[in-house]
Structures are given as C-alpha cells and as structure tokens.
Image: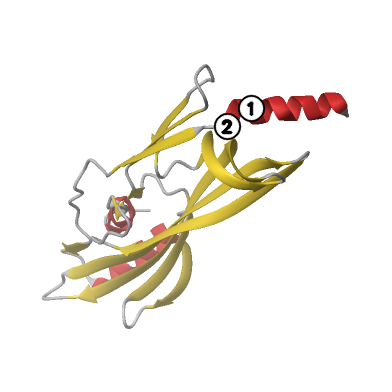
Amino acid sequence: MKRLMLVLVMMFLLVVGCATGKMWVKPAMDYVYENKVVVNVDKDKVWNQLIRNVAQSFFVINNLDKESGFINLSYSGAAAPYVDCGTMNIEASGPPGVTKYSYSFPYTSPYEAYVTCREVQSNIGLQKQLCPTKRSTSLAGRINILVQGVEGEKTKVSVYVKYVFTVKVQTQWMFGVYNRSHQWDWVASFITNGEDRGCKPTGELERIILDFVGKEV
C-alpha cells in the first residue's frame, strides 16, 4: 500500500504545472457541388431506377411516395468523407523534463486517443493533471429526395441533406487511488450547402444519390 501511494505521489509531482495548447484549423477547401440534376428520362423510369439503387446501398429507406416523388432516407456512420470540420492540433506538456505530447488529426476522425492537461477535482482539491482522453465521432444524415417530371420527358431530381455531426469525449483522472472520468458531447447540425461550428458538407452524399439516377442495375 505504501509503495502504491509513493507511485501516486510521484505521478502527481510529474504533472503539476502541466499545460495544453489547442489549435483548430478550419477546412481548407470551399466545396462547390450540385444537389440537383435534370435528365432526359421520364419520371417513372427515373423513380424505379433510383429506388433499385438506393435499396442496394447503405442508406435506409424511411418513407417514399411515388405520386409526389418524395423519398426520405437515413445515413448513420462515419463522418468522413461526407463532412469536413477542419483539423485539430493538440500539444500537452508537464514541467520541464516531462515528455511533451503532440497530436494532429482531422476533426472528423472516427477515433483518437491522446493526453490533455485539465484542472480537475481531486481528493486534495483542484489540481492540474495530464489526463488520458478518448474521442470518437459519428454522423447521422436525413436525406430528402424529390423526383419531379418537368417539360417533355425530362425529370428533375433534387437532394437535400440534414447533417448531425457528434463528437464524444471522455477524460480520465486520478482521485486518490481511484480513477474518475467525465464524458461530454459536442454537436454540429447543418444542411446541404450550409455550415455550423466550422463544419460543412463535402457534397459526397449528394453526389452518391445523384449518381444513382444514371446508374443502371
């Protein structure tokens, strides 16, 4: 028990005065993409082809109505390559002589593990500690598709996506001889050609849907 306490005291001494520097770099690209297409094919054929392709894809069909030309889909999974939220750079360090930690990763990275310096409530009061941190991300998309007959035998297909990008962060620290942890969520919500909290669509989801229109199965 004494040896354990000595180790914990040494850990505490190592991390006193730690610091973390964070720098978020916004997306480097301005994405330009189409979310509508007009094809020289009648509505019935476009509708049937679109449904066949969607049914064989990773999208989930929630609702559809052929008469109005409305289709609602869901997507759930990785954020990249469908969303760009820039890059996160993190540096964490303790007192002189203690290892410095540097990290750089896309903000949409599915999973990252790193160390940060945080002021936490310990058994001896507020204390700065180098804390192991885990971070995961996910993307949920609701996609509305509208298939409309226009002049002659032409058909117009429009795609509108509502994106919800979620980051979950969990940090651990020592409270005496016990581990403590805290988790919090960060959420950005935006639509096709929109932006929120530095996150924006790349147009890839919209492109996949529009490609279904001209893809024979």
Residue 54: give x, y in percent of width and height.
Answer: 41, 60
Residue at 65% x, 41% y is 173
At label 1, the amino acid type is: Leu
Quick one: label 2, few (<14), some, or many (20+) residues within 10 Å?
A: some
Q: Secondary structure at mark 1?
A: helix
In the rendered image, the vertical position of residue 149 relative to residue 163, given as above or below: below
Residue 112 appears in the rendering = no
At label 2, the amino acid type is: Val
Residue at 34% x, 76% y is 70
In the rendered image, the vertical position of residue 10 relative to residue 147, given as above or below: above
Residue 42: give x, y in percent of width and height.
Answer: 22, 70
Marker disc for residue 16: 2
Check whether the beta carbons of the residues at disc 2 and disc 1 lie within 8 A of each other. yes
Q: Toward which corner of the image does residue 69 lie, by quadrant?
A: bottom left
Q: Which residue is mark 1?
A: 13
Residue 74: give x, y in percent of width and height.
Answer: 45, 64
Residue 152: give x, y in percent of width and height.
Answer: 11, 75
- On the rendered structure, is 151 left or right of 118? left
Of 74 and 8, nearer the camera is 8
Residue at 49% x, 20% y is 96
Of 182 and 39, nearer the camera is 182
Residue at 59% x, 53% y is 183
In the rendered image, the vertical position of residue 112 relative to residue 96, given as above or below: below
Q: Residue furthest front?
A: 124
- On the rendered structure, is 180 left or right of 142? right
Of 57 and 43, nearer the camera is 57
Q: Residue furthest bottom?
A: 67
Q: Toward which corner of the image does residue 37 lie, by quadrant?
A: bottom left
Of 209 and 40, nearer the camera is 209
Q: Secondary structure at mark 2?
A: loop
Assign the N terminus to one quadrant of the image: top right
Q: CA distance from mark 2 to mark 1?
A: 6 Å
